[in-house]
Amino acid sequence: MEPLSAIEIAGRIIYQLSPVWISLVILYAFSIGFKRRLGLYGKLFDSPIGMIGFGLVMFWVFTGVYGAMDMIITHDPLSQLSGMKNKVPGTPLRSPEEGQYEWYLLGGDNLARDVFSRLVKGAWEVIKIAPMAAVFAFMVGITLGLPAGYYGGRLDTALSFAANLILAFPVILLFYLLVTPEIVATGVPNYMAIVLFVFPIIFVGVLLNSRYYTRPKLRNWLLPVVLGTIIWFYLQLVSNGGYLINTPEYAIWGLPRAMDMFDIPGGILVVFVSVVFVNSPTVFRIVRGLTLDIKTRDYVAAAQTRGEGPWYIMLWEILPNARGPLIVDFCLRIGYTTILLGTLGFFGLGLPPESPDWGSTINDGRKLLSIYLHPALPPAFALLTLVLGLNLLADGLREESLKD
Amino acid sequence: MGLFILRRSGVMLLTALCLTFIVFFLTNLYPNLEKLAKTQGNFRMSDEAVASWLDANGYGGSMVSKYGQWLGVLPGWTRETEDGYSGRCMTGTVSAEVAAEASTFCGILQGDWGYSTRFKDEVSTIVAERLGNTGRLMFWVLVLMIPSALIIGVLAGMREGSVTDRSLSTASILTTATPEYVSGVIFIAVFTSSTVGLKWFKGTATSAMDNPNFENFFLPVLTIALYGMGYIARMTRASMTEVMTAQYIRTARLKGVSFHNIVMKHALRNALIAPFTVIMLQFPWLLNGVVIVETLFNYKGFGWILVEAAGNNDIELLLAVSVVSVFVVLITQLISDIGYVYLNPRIRIS
């Protein structure tokens, strides 16, 4: 069979991505159609920069999600086919079996795996970790930053010192210290997970209680139900195979296996925890700064005069009014998390070596870069476009939210 | 001002102590020590052999006492064996007379940074040599990055919303979205590989350690500079647009000063105060860039020893590396605070 030409490769990749195009068209049609009723999200479609950024981000989100459902990929990202090692894009398979896709669209890497399928699967690795890590970093940063800014004093000094302490660490040194199999064996990441993942529970608990404590009837069933569900998820998240911490010397019992619906592999957990750990001090500083600014406003004084509690003021008066900068920073933070995940992969830390994530793929590909370009360049451009999309999206959001 | 610097130095010292203790704690956890023992001894050591190796080399004992020894506030460990004496302050096994003469304290307070298990050499010599390499790299990065970032920022901020502004801003966003390991790989692919065929530069900077020239040194410098450049340019642009809408600029324009003179004489000085802080605070990020780029271009500097020390759990080298990087971060923060007060008369007077 003949190798494909450049135009044929492009055509086949575009065809292979057709579910993504369809989803994007539907999303844009609906969003532009109803943009006046969609608040800030709708306003995004007034700014060309924001629209381009949102398009890039959603392209990779759809690619990742459909890739995870095995829709776009042409081959298994881990299987090695004989004779395909380092082959250029568009090379036909040597002996295609019945029903097998007949080409390697973006060529093969140095272990004869399909670069295109690994690229698509790599998108899912980012999409499933980065936004969640940003959410957790925000929960930690908000829960600590609001009281630090609102109360000030000793609490502020202590928390700011701790935040500056973490920020003074070179990120890569921290990763090298935290994300190694030896540290995973000591259970340190599990302890960190137990502490860091408590913050969402505190956040939601205080959020609901401060709002509804005047309506005990509603509060008394709402709070247990919501908190119960979150705590159950929390325990599932932090306990693995029936243990909270399981080291050779000692073990702490966790949730029984029967109630544990999912386990997170140690490698992924430590990556997740350290990314959250690195990001939360920055969020803390932003939230603290915004709180210091907003707490001098009249509506805060009004709330204080009518006798609202401090947590109500923080969470229902200050936080909603700080949402503009926080939403913008959230987009940037996802981008930064993506870069951090790539850095981890680039140094071969945490994620399993055969993992298709972009950082590891770039690291694999760079060793033969002077001869073969195709294994390293596609993941590099993928990471570039995703982070660029997030930055443009943040820029668009900033512009539109300033127009109010 | 003196009190301010004194207080900041106190906080700095406390931060450095906390950070080195964290590094010390993490590197001295048992699985890490076990790995160290096995790489230094042999990989088939039994658990007892590992324990006795650790004990014989001073890795036993409590965390706090070992940290005190490293700092130089507790006496260094000594051990009597059949062949003679060994200890923290002695090299190898020595006789009783030599051991009696050796100093009791030998930590960083006494200027003894310890011994690297990875490179089999004194930590202070390794760090000094490698820092020199990185210093050269950083010098050229700053030479390239700061002027171009400021020029881009000022040009973009001069006329807000113009075509120049739009295109330069988009370019800055693009560079901030490109981490070093992406831009480095793209540069190597485009400018050095035989497939593209340009071959303008060399793909490694190994030869640049002895003989840096444009061909082998430009790509690593550009890769680090580019990531920071966009951010500084955006901050400069923001500061410039703010200054250009100020009242005194309008006054100058109304009295007929030419646009060129407004920008050069009136706006520029005030617009460059904010970027100064940003440039100083950019140093911690540059440190990350250095680690990535030195790995990518195989340039053996400070970032390279960080990776080597961390990968081999070389405790004392790693501690020295973290002390150096923490001080770089904290001192640049201090300089940025002091410089901001110095540059901005409004703060100095009030």
Image (tube, helix red, strand yellow):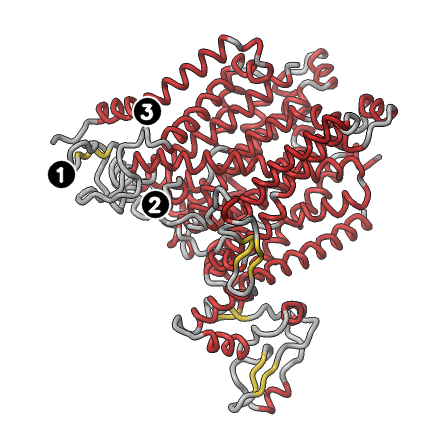
Q: Could you confirm whether marks 1 and 3 are on the same chain?
A: yes
Q: Tell me the quarter of the image containing the N terminus of chain A.
A: top left
| Residue B19 higher or lower than B40, as above or below | above
Check disc 2 and report its element: helix, strand or loop: helix
Amino acid type of disc 1?
Answer: Ser
For disc 1, the neighbor class at 10 Å (few under 14, some 14 to 19, many from 20) is: few
- Number of marks drawn: 3
Q: Tell me the quarter of the image containing the C terminus of chain A.
A: top right
Point 44% across, 72% down: residue: B40
Give the Cα separation between the discs numbered 2 and 1: 29 Å
Q: Which disc is residue A17 wearing?
A: 3
**Residue A50: x percent and y percent?**
51, 19
Q: Is residue B274 left or right of residue A233?
A: right
**Residue A396: x percent and y percent?**
55, 20
Q: Please tell me which residue lies in front, A272 or B94.
A: A272
Q: Please tell me which residue lies in front, A124 or B92.
A: A124
Say which residue label 1 marks.
A95
Check disc 3 and report its element: helix, strand or loop: loop
Q: Is residue A77 left or right of residue B108?
A: left
Marked residue chain, label 1 = A
| Residue A357 higher or lower than B109, as above or below | above
**Residue A296: x percent and y percent?**
81, 27
